[in-house]
Amino acid sequence: MNEYDKKLFGGFIRRRRQHVFENLSLSWFAERIGISKAYLSRIELGYEIPTEDVIKLIAEELFLDTDFLLSMAGKISSDLVKIIIDRPSRIVDLLRICGELDRKKLELLFATAQTLGKGE
């Protein structure tokens, strides 16, 4: 991840934290998620991209989708990495197909996959 993207990610976290917890400090939020104030400051200033575990904590506290926040940080969750490693060619093929679908067809594919996943 380049420096510009790190700054965008950190700025997004800072703005979201300030929006969700209007008058509460960076120290308070850092303590709430179990990291140091210095580490959170480095994240918000764009000097550091947090680990997956920290991103999950931040997402939960800021009412954000974990996969969305991971993708902003240039990461994917470890459970998805395992799926890709277990079935690399089929998953990659499926992702490429999805990339070519319009929104309506993608929603249909998603609904079908959900049905198949439920064993119906």
Image (cartoon, helix red, strand yellow):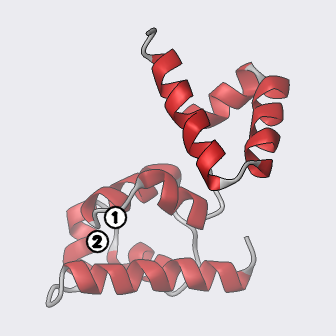
Residue at image point 33% right, 77% down: 37
Quadrant of the rendered image containing residue 73:
bottom right
- Name the secondary structure under disc 1: loop
Residue 77 visible in the current orientation: no
What kind of residue is marked 2? Answer: Ala
- Name the secondary structure under disc 2: helix
Residue 17 visible in the current orientation: yes
Which residue matches tag 2?
30
Q: Please give left or right for residue 25 compared with residue 4 in the image.
A: left
- The percent coordinates of residue 68 (x first, y second) are 50, 59
Q: Which quadrant does the C terminus fall into?
A: top left
- The percent coordinates of residue 33 (x first, y second) are 27, 61
Q: Please give left or right for residue 54 compared with residue 75 in the image.
A: left
Vertical order, 79 against 52 (above or below):
above
Q: Residue furthest left?
A: 23
- The percent coordinates of residue 119 (x first, y second) are 45, 9
Residue at image point 44% right, 49% down: 53
Q: Please give left or right for residue 40 compared with residue 106 in the image.
A: left
Q: Residue furthest bottom?
A: 23
Residue at image point 66% right, 79% down: 5
* Depth order, front residue of 21/91: 91
Vertical order, 6 against 112 (above or below):
below
Residue at image point 27% right, 86% down: 18
Which residue matches tag 1?
35
Quadrant of the rendered image containing residue 17:
bottom left
Q: Which quadrant does the N terminus fall into?
A: bottom right
Q: Please give left or right for residue 48 compared with residue 89 in the image.
A: left
What kind of residue is marked 1? Answer: Ile
Separation (CA) of disc 2 from disc 1: 5 Å
Vertical order, 92 against 44 (above or below):
above
